[in-house]
Amino acid sequence: MASTSSTSNIPPPLPTSLVTTLLPHLLPPSPLPQELLAKSLLQRLLYLPPSPSDLDSYLSPFPSTEHQPISSRLTELTHGHTLGDILYTKEEEEIYAKLSILPENEIKDESIEIWFEFEHSSSDSRGWVYHSARIPSQLNQKFVSNPELSSTLVETESEEKMGYEEMNNLQGDQAPEGYWTGFDSSSNSNSPKSILNEFNENHEDAYWAQYSRPQTAPITPGIHTPGIHTPGIHTPGIHTPFQNQQKQNQNQNQNRNQPKINTQEEQAKKLMESLKQLGLDSLNKDITNGYSEMNGQDGKREFWVESEDQEKYNNTIDQSENDEIAITKDKVEVEESGKAIKDRLKCKISVSLNKLWKKHIQGSNELDLEIKAIEWLNFGKQVIENSSSPNTSSPGGYTSYNGESSLDIIDKLEILLDMYELLNETNEKDNFHKLMESVIRKSPDYRNHEDEDEVVRQNMYYE
């Protein structure tokens, strides 16, 4: 039974048709097809939806960094690429396949890996599905070229694990050297009783004796303690440490009660007396009681006025520097927000085109879809031609289209084209026509809830 279950879990080789079908959907604005995505990726997009501007988070669960530009590297591979070999690996019960996509110059540093997962755990297994896109890295995994050999990877890992455990068990069973000698009962070894007899009982008596003294009795210093004597209470000229501390506290209280002297004024008076003794008092007639009355600053000396002016000047310079830094930050934020606004506008245009296409094919069956697609492309062609030649932009240019719904769609396409021209992209006319071509798809059958969910999911992806 075990052999039949293991053989039933062996997947078939990854079909190349699945790879060619998936690759165009990895680039915007094409949405990721829900039927080709792994369940782990669908759950992550549903419960932890990434930012619309972060395209790498839609393609891979790994964070996007400057060293891991997944979306930009995929865009570079559109100019030309070659498919590498398909390799298979196994992690516990899951089987994965990876495919390397190399550029035309076959430089591995510019390649990217597409990983697929094989679903076999349930009855509604979908087989090989897209798992993630990754930058090549050094992994401690073993890969095989045939999925049938994936079972050998698990056997090799289990054998290595069992060998490691057996080695640990053997090492754990060996006792350290000299371990059993502690249990030897020879007469030469010292018994615990002999060790206890060697313990000096005087040490224990001295230890407990220090707790037997009364708490109120002072501890008398020993004979050999130098510099400590116990003088009498009435011995003149000798103060105990308690009396010294009391006298120190009294001196501190007296110092607190004395009025504080203004040190600045006292220094100024001493300076005036020194100038009088030197005969230089005539040079400082404006000084009264050590203070200057110049510049109308009463009660302040001149050097304080100069220091305050210098401080105001420094504050003005600091404020101007802070304003320049704030202006620079605002410019950076405006530049960053400009690119984000362009990306958001492009997504909005794609969503609006999807809605117009849905309105255009409403009520049509599968046989009419080809006719509707041709009409849709003619609408876009006429709008682009009229925008290039303003002389023919009158309503008479659309006389060949009958029906108010067609004219309504054309009017909205003109507005979307004007919005797209604001992006200032190269070949903007051709790019707008490509956007219109990308929205042409199979008309959803709203009786089937899976198709309806697919349309809703795609609209949410663009928004």
Image (spheres, grey):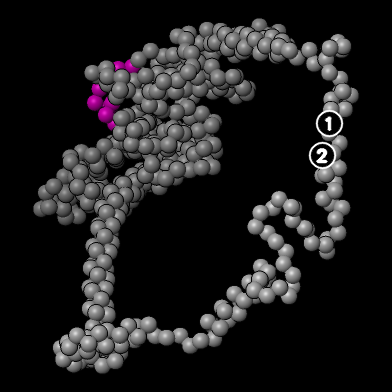
Instruction: Please indicate whether residue 197 sits to the left or right of residue 158 in the image.
Output: right
Residue 67 horizontal side relative to residue 294, left or right:
right
Decide which of 168, 273 is in the foreground and name it: 273
Q: Residue at x 38, y 23 (%)?
A: 136
Q: x%, y% of residue 147? A: 50, 10
- Kind of residue at badge 1: Phe
Q: Is residue 366 above or below residue 225?
A: above
Numbered disc 2: secondary structure:
helix
Residue 269 magenta:
no
Q: Quadrant of residue 94?
A: top right
**Residue closer to the observer: 169 or 142:** 169
Disc 2: which residue: 203
Q: Is residue 269 left or right of residue 164?
A: left
Q: Count every numbered label the image shows and give the total.
A: 2
Q: Residue at x 29, y 51 (%)?
A: 336
Residue tagged 1: 199
Identify the image quadrant of residue 112: top left
Counting from the top left corner in percent of width and height, residue 289 is at 29, 92
Q: In the rendered image, which quarter contains the N terminus?
A: top right
Magenta region, residue range = 75-83
Q: Is residue 27 above or below residue 182?
A: below
For the point 89% across and 24% down, the residue is 193
Q: Secondary structure at mark 1?
A: loop
Q: Are marks 2 and 1 in contact (CB under 8 Å)?
A: yes
Image spot of residue 441 (x, y percent): 38, 34
